[in-house]
Amino acid sequence: MSDFLSERSLLGRYYLYRATMSVGFITPIFTLFLLRSLTYTQLAALSALYSVLAVVSEVPTGYVGDRLGRRASLLLSVAFTVGSVGGFVVMDGFIPYAVLYALWALALVFRSGSMDAWLYDVLDERLDADRFSHVRGRGDAVQNWTAAVSMIGGGLLYGIEPTYPFVVAALFNSLGFVTLLSLPKNSQYADGSKDSDRLGPLAALTIARDHLVRPPLRSLVVYVGLFYAVIGVAQGYVQPMAVETLAPYASQFGMDLRAGTAVARAGKAGPSLALGLGVLYAGLTAVAAVGGYYAGRIENRLGVRRAVLCVSGITAAALVVPLWIGAFALPMFAAMRTSMPLVKPIANGYINDHTASVGRATLLSVVSMGYMALRTPLVLGTGVVADAATATTAVAALGGLFLAIGGTVWLFGTVAPETEATGQPDRSPS
């Protein structure tokens, strides 16, 4: 029956699937939960483990998506997500948490290339591939709005019992199985083709290499990869930056942010602090949802090249401003959370436009691997700067780094040129 879905039904089911991907119930309290039994050093070690596993797993899992089918890969991602989130209810300690982080990394990599590859091919087969940025952006918005609502609930649940947000999140994420099974497979996996007709691992890697080492994708992948890495690392410093930059203003209204942070660092949080974190993160996530919703319109208005440049440049500059104007931290947080949902659908749509359908999930996984590889040294370097100076200084350094390196890539490379979307790599000389 799924082969005859109407446009409204197909997109509605996709948006429902994106809603089930939300982990808003645990996002605002996750660090507090782990700090009950871990140190900050152990948290950093878990984050490094996650990054390394994501890097080494990206290409193999992308190949699984191309070999077995994108929907099958997404179903595996849901299974690993539910296993990881649910595991925090019954497991405790550094080693058990390392296992759960490994499951979380597998959940990420099994969907990183396959989700966009599935969507692009389905739109190409049934509707219009040119709508990718619009549909992908709306999907991001649905996921973020769902997260915003559930974040408040997560804060309330944590104040009652710390494991409750994880129980509810695991149950909610498990609905992804139902929504995915209601969606169609890509045609190349639904027509009964033989395994011998499908892509081998060497052929998949060759296709990925041919697309990424030449224009028009080479400079774009480096540019947006650095941007994603910078924003991803900077988002981890929202709480300490809020304390450093906003505490003087909050104290005027009788609010002691520094005391609240001391409680958080001790791994304890009462109902009011947990709810406050839920509200803060919900507000930032709601702002991010607006960005995803309008990604398609911004691409239509500015084009891929100017949209990527404007959003990334303005956001990177905003990271630097709180170093001198503390009150600018709040709009900077909003800019950070909005920029990724804006840039990602636009950039991924361009990459899909210039990628052959065969091997698409593998190539997108290679791209994601590059993003994670760039993120790893930035995590370590930013931590050193934050310890030596302040979190605000570390985030400003990230913004300056992107403006310098990203500007060089933009000046000497050709980021997202207006070329015909042929699905084959451009063989012109660089």
Image (tube, grey):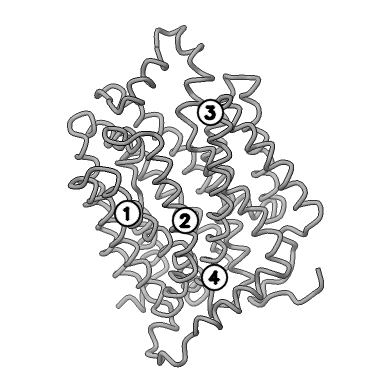
- Which amino acid, mark 4? Asp
Residue 176 position within the rendered picture, expressed as x and y whole percent measured from the top left: 29, 60
Circle 1: element type: helix
Asked whether the beta carbons under mark 3 and mark 4 sit within 8 Å of each other, the answer is no
Circle 4: element type: loop
Circle 3 residue = 387
Q: Report which quarter residue 151 is drawn in.
A: top left
Q: Residue at x 58, y 24 (%)?
A: 389
Circle 4 residue = 128
Q: Is residue 233 left or right of residue 400?
A: left
Asked whether the beta carbons under mark 2 and mark 3 sit within 8 Å of each other, the answer is no
- Which amino acid, mark 2? Val
Name the foreground residue: 31 vs 179.
31
Circle 2 residue = 52
Dot 4 crowding, Cα within 10 Å, few <14, some 14–19, many 20+: few
Dot 2 crowding, Cα within 10 Å, few <14, some 14–19, many 20+: some
Q: Residue at x 22, y 28 (%)?
A: 159
Look at discs 4 and 2 and give the one toward the viewer. Answer: 2
Q: Earlier in the sequence, mark 2 or mark 3?
A: 2
Distance in Å between CA atoms under marks 1 and 4: 25 Å
Circle 2: element type: helix
Classify 86 as above or below 125. above
Residue 303 position within the rendered picture, expressed as x and y whole percent measured from the top left: 69, 55
Q: Report which quarter residue 11 is drawn in.
A: bottom left
Residue 55 position within the rendered picture, expressed as x and y whole percent measured from the top left: 49, 60
